[in-house]
Image (tube, helix red, strand yellow):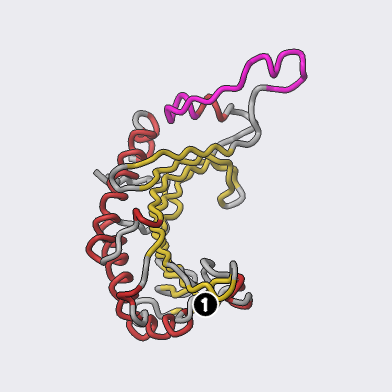
Amino acid sequence: MGRKVLKNKPLIEVIFEMRWELEEKAPNIFVDPHHKLLLGRFYERLGEIYPYHEELSTASVPDEISYYITKQRLRSAENDWPLIQIGPGIITLNETTKYKWEDFRERISQMLKTFLESYPNSEKLIFNKLLLRYIDGIEFNYEKNNILDFLAEKMKTNINLHNKLFEKTGVINAPENVDLRFSFPSETPKGLVQVRFAKGKKEEKDFLMWETMVHSFDDDVRSSKEEIMKWVDESHDLSGDWFFKIIEGELEERFK
């Protein structure tokens, strides 16, 4: 199913993330011996598409204590998206409001192909995590409206605390903040589907942020480019199905 085209889509960011196993240099010390070489080879192949390079502040932290943290960023243009981030054992593709699935999927395929060509002895790599993460948001006034009522009425998500908690306590039953997380096992693809609702900020305004994530770990992670792209398609279909079931009704009409 995936995501249908919405004129006023609430999307803030979409992220594809891939991780691989590292070498254990000492107890609890892991290294990616080809991290720096990967960046150079990768840029040689995709520099025309992502010509703007940024070194993140995390680049100054020794690799031995900062594995699975992105350190370098390649952008399509200065301060623009999409972008690719690379660090020891990790690579991500990020897009924001210009997101269109066909383009994003093609960029994942392109990034994956280039990664496998750039990483030394890539056929020996063991991937241990895949993630497709959608972050959406809608402006919300937490002072004038009850977020739990909104979640129940507009997003079909019912969360209630025991009424007696608020009786004769002086505590008002209207949360000023929210951070709810749910994880459920998934069969297609094999892994977890996760949903999170949380208070956030965008352009200094209060928002309700919600995330739809599909994770696969360790033995559930596929190894070849073809298998990973199949995982990408399955994860996109699953996250899109959940997204539209959550916003079905008034919110979907608002976003059209």
> From this viewpoint, which residue is outermost toward the front?
27
Q: Tag 1: Cα neighbours inside 10 Å, few (<14), some, or many (≥20)?
A: some
Q: Residue at x 43, y 74 (%)?
A: 77
State the image coordinates of residue 114 (x, y, percent, origin top left): 31, 76
Q: Is residue 153 magenta?
A: yes
State the image coordinates of residue 64 (x, y, percent, origin top left): 59, 74
Quadrant in which the N terminus appears: top left
Tell me which corner region of the image, top left, top right, bottom left or bottom right, holds residue 244.
top left
Q: Is residue 162 magenta?
A: yes
Left or right, 42 with respect to 160, comes to left
Quadrant in which the C terminus appears: top left
In the rendered structure, which amino acid carries the disc numbered 1? Glu
- The residues colored magenta run 151-172
Q: Main secondary structure of the magenta part?
A: loop
State the image coordinates of residue 94 (x, y, percent, origin top left): 42, 62
State the image coordinates of residue 26 (x, y, percent, origin top left): 58, 74
